[in-house]
Amino acid sequence: MTNYVQVDYPWPEIALVRIIRPDAKNALNDAVREQLTAAFQTVDLNTDVRCAVLTGSGAVFVAGADIKSLAEMTSTEMRRSNAAEVWAALRKFSKPLIAAVNGLALGGGCELAMHADIVIAGESARFGQPEIKVGIIPGAGGTQRLTRAVGKFKAMRMLLTGDPLSARDADTIGLVSEVVPDAVVLERALQIAETIAARPPIAARQIKKLVLAASELPISEALLQEREAFVSMFDTRDQKEGMRAFIEKRPAVFSGE
């Protein structure tokens, strides 16, 4: 099988997951989804890794699903496909995830970026959910995550027209975290990953878990979960190290314990 997904470790604490299918603009087919699923499951189980970066190859992040492989499928065949597996692996991924987006992030590519916790976009990046143009709707959270990220009216315009947004417009409506020159997108994402990797990993995972729960739980229940997680931090070595380092005016070294 062709290797479409590559995992590297620029530092032991950081995993770089790269989609390599440039001839098809990194479009998501069954093989890519299967390999992405395996990659994120492996990285999540790697206890050395504290943060991950996801990016594409060439001048594109992910142009969407592979339409040629979908054109003649029936609903029964779609239900039997592995399309949902990668999204489940990403939803369950417990560590901070940064998307480094150059070029197109359309359809499944936009949905892939929205599964990240931080999105760094190049100035030429384009974000969109064009599924309506080929007679379907988003199927991996596009109607749900997009609405939660940017609000009903901005989401409706994107979803109903299928027209993409520039990186600057995506930044304005809250779809990305930061826009940088194209040449430094991955460098900036790795820089942020390095910063996060130096923070206490237990606290980072708890923050991610709580923020993601914020869109699903009533505020009263979410606040209770936050309080319980906050209290639990005081049983960690990292809390002792962090506060002692602050008092002693020295850099903290977090062990993840």
Image (spheres, rainbow, N blue to C red):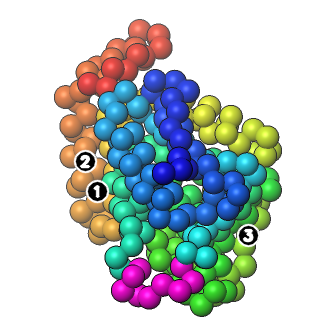
Separation (CA) of disc 1 from disc 2: 6 Å
Tell me if residue 68 comes above or below residue 213 in the rendering.
Answer: below
* Mark 3–mark 1 distance (CA, rounded to whole Å): 34 Å
Q: Nearer the viewer, mark 3 or mark 1?
A: 3
Which segment is the magenta one? 70-78
Residue 164 in sight from this viewpoint: yes
Check disc 1 and give the amino acid type: Leu
Could you tell me how many numbered marks the image carries?
3
Residue 28 percent across, percent down from the top left:
55, 64
**Going by the image, does 239 lie left or right of 23?**
left
Which residue position is annotated with label 2? 227
- Quarter of the rendering containing residue 233: top left
Residue beneath label 3, please? 165
Instruction: Tell me: 69 left or right of 30.
Output: right
Residue 205 pos. (x, y %): 35, 42
Q: Amino acid at mark 3?
A: Leu
Give the residue type at disc 2.
Answer: Arg
Where is residue 144 shown, x and y percent of the image?
46, 75
Q: Which badge, 3 or 1, comes first in the chain's sequence?
A: 3
Q: Which residue is mark 1?
A: 223
Marks 1 and 2: CB-CB under 8 Å?
A: yes
Tag 3 near tag 2, CB within 8 Å: no
